[in-house]
Image (cartoon, grey):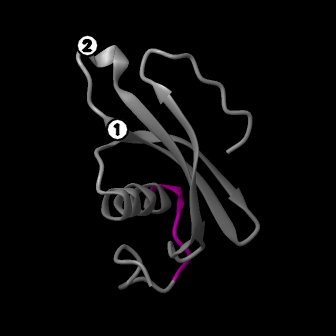
Amino acid sequence: MSEVNSTMTKKLNALDIHECAKSLADRLLKKKVEGVSGMRNEDEHWKVVVEVLERKSIPDTQDMIGVYEFKLDSDGDLVEYRRIELRRRSDRSVVDEV
């Protein structure tokens, strides 16, 4: 069970899932989390899109940003994750689905 949910007995809400995903990204990827860019509740799972700094560059518009999709269960436990995109910070990006 996740740290956020260890003292709770109810399902996590969106804010809890948001924090779980950021924490998991930080611990698993060991990279700076830039933010959460999307979330969706699907049946018994949450899909959360997290952006992380893959490589710092000068100028910062050339930073490499990794976009990861995390799938969490209703308790905030990780089911799966994968990188869905790698782009420069300055590149425009459109991800159709969360």
Please name the predominant secondary structure of the magenta segment in the image: loop
In the displayed orientation, state which residue is furthest to the left.
Answer: 58
Q: Is residue 34 above or below residue 39?
A: above
Nearest the viewer among 51 and 72 is 51
Q: The disc labelled 1 sits on which kind of residue?
A: Leu
Name the quadrant of the N terminus. Answer: bottom left
* Position of 31 relative to 63 (above/below): below
Q: Position of residue 76 (x, y in %)?
A: 50, 72
- For mark 2, what is the residue? 59
- The amino acid type of the residue labelled 2 equals Pro
Residue shown at 41%/78% (left/top)? 2
Q: Magenta part of the protein: which range?
A: 10-15
Q: Which residue is mark 1?
A: 53
Residue 62 found in image quarter: top left
Magenta stretch: includes residue 74: no
Whether residue 70 appears in this view of the structure is: no
